[in-house]
Image: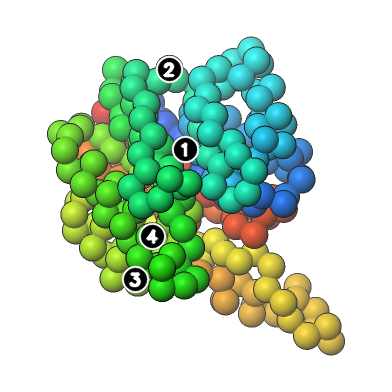
Amino acid sequence: YLPRPQSTPQSPAGHVFSLMQVNVFKFNRKHELLLHFIDKYKPDVITIAEATPDWRDALKKLTEEKDGWPYMIDQAKPGSNGMMVLSRHEFSQQESLYPATDTHPALLFRINVNAQDILIASLHPLSPVSKTRFKHRDKYMGGVAASLQQGQDDAVIVAGDMNMTMYAPSYKSFLRQTDLQNTRNGRGLYPTWPVYIPLPTKFKAENLMIPHLLRIPIDHVLYKGNIRPLKFKTLPALGSDHLATLTFFALP
């Protein structure tokens, strides 16, 4: 994951596909910050975890804008298990999987961009803060892997707050089962959580590297097939405990 010198790849067809992935945090009310970055980067697809009805109401206007995001998967719910997807491209197929519990879905959907079919999975398994939740998280990821193995798709993107780092055995097992790669490869660690780290009041967080160094990378964008990642980045803090990610892909 250490950055290495890279040439700037170009899409052969001149078409770039972008995906924004964000856990908005269920108690976050700073809707305008996310709306600002959506307007700034205008991603093709936005996947949203911890989408509450309040967030749905704030983002729904994007479906009504000219040149906006008219296609939406709405599974917003109170609490931490709501999910949403906004897309500029029509869904040719969509499915909600419940691989581990009846509360935390995995959203699978297909879109066609520049004559290229893309299967996208938006994930948010349980955080492994207890033995039971740890097992649920791994069962969730295993169920998604099994679903992805059933298809022979030309292009696959898996994105979300996966509640595991790249160092976790469960993460490595998921990649072995799916043949996916991380868009961080050769670009950096890009830690995403937690944005806020308590420090003694006598220290000024802005003068220390500690907050950045103690974050861990648990929000991922994985891919395989005939698409190539051009750029991966994290966005500034949006009022959530996670940093959002933005990925650009070259399409054939």
Residue 33: tell me if it is visible. Answer: yes
Q: Which mark is residue 19?
A: 1
- Frontmost of labels 4 and 2 is 4
Q: Position of residue 186 (x, y in %)?
A: 35, 60
| Picture residue at 63% right of the left edge, 34% below the top | 38
Mark sitting earlier along the chain (4/2):
2
Q: Which residue is mark 4?
A: 137
Q: Residues within 10 Å of mark 4 (few under 14, many from 20)?
A: many
Q: Residues within 10 Å of mark 1 (few under 14, many from 20)?
A: many
Q: Which residue is mark 3?
A: 168
Tell which residue pokes out farthest to the top in this image. Answer: 66
Report the amino acid beneath label 2.
Glu
Secondary structure beneath label 4: helix
Task: Name the side, left or right, on which 150 lies relative to 101.
Answer: left
Residue 117 vs 179, above or below: the answer is: above
Mark sitting earlier along the chain (4/1):
1
Task: Name the side, left or right, on which 192 lies relative to 228.
Answer: right
Q: Which residue is mark 2?
A: 90
Viewer-proximal residue, 236 or 29? 29
